[in-house]
Amino acid sequence: DAGITQSPRHKVTETGTPVTLRCHQTENHRYMYWYRQDPGHGLRLIHYSYGVKDTDKGEVSDGYSVSRSKTEDFLLTLESATSSQTSVYFCAISESGGGYGYTFGSGTRLTVV
Amino acid sequence: DQQVKQNSPSLSVQEGRISILNCDYTNSMFDYFLWYKKYPAEGPTFLISISSIKDKNEDGRFTVFLNKSAKHLSLHIVPSQPGDSAVYFCAASAGQTGANNLFFGTGTRLTVIP
């Protein structure tokens, strides 16, 4: 979507390796989110950020860490990838937070083998 | 524990007819509800929303109905078009509590048959 890009779009990695996914926005929105989408679960929040260096956990944060050193970039790191982290990861941005006005990126399909 | 539920994984409708997608929720603190549409290999895109102070919101062919006592909402698409074929996610938030999460249902795949 315009204003938000995710990289890479696809990645295959081995169990036990660290992986970093990047979300970049050009909208200058305060809030940024990482979700994962899995069959039978819909989208679930991993972590979110409400400002530079301000982050908090979501409902499925175990095994993940995030960093936001600039307004435009929000990084998601899998410290030691496991097969249960095979998923499609979506980044979202919002100007006001609180569930309002989310814009999603196109997603990153991660496969852990 | 799924706080937002979409019990129909799929729905097929003839072009020109009405599509009705249903969603139930369990958390009485939810005060804002949204529908997102998702095409393959793309992110979800916002479709329509409704605040808990309303029971209906309309935008062109799309109408969302909210029944708070039943904790139920539905999305009506009239008339349905082949381009509406996608996965539809219901989502809810408790924004007024300061919570910063959208809770999503599992999605309903709509197929509109030409």
Image (tube, rainbow, N blue to C red):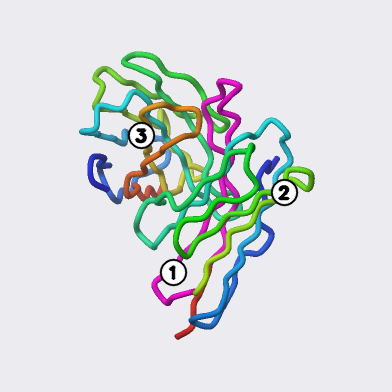
Q: Which residue, given by chain and number where applicable, does mark 1 sit on?
A: B84
Q: Which residue, given by chain and number where applicable, does mark 2 sit on?
A: B67
Front residue (pair B17, B41): B17
Front residue (pair A62, B64): B64
Q: Tell me if mark 1 has few (under 14), some (14-19) or many (20+) residues whose alpha carbon lies within 10 angstroms of its own.
A: some
Work out whether disc 2 and disc 1 sit on a shared chain: yes
Work out whether disc 3 and disc 2 sit on a shared chain: no
Q: Is residue B88 above or below residue A65?
A: below
Give the left or right position of residue B81, taking residue A39 as reference.
Answer: left
Q: Position of residue A65 (x, y in %)?
A: 42, 24
Q: CA distance from mark 3 to mark 1?
A: 25 Å
Q: Residue at x 66, y 52 (%)?
A: B73
Give the left or right position of residue A10, taking residue A112 as reference.
Answer: left
Range covered by the magenta-colored residues: B80-109
- Residue furthest left in the image: A26
Q: Which residue, given by chain and number where applicable, does mark 3 sit on?
A: A93
Q: Position of residue A8 (x, y in %)?
A: 25, 44
Give the left or right position of residue B1, taking residue B79 as reference.
Answer: right
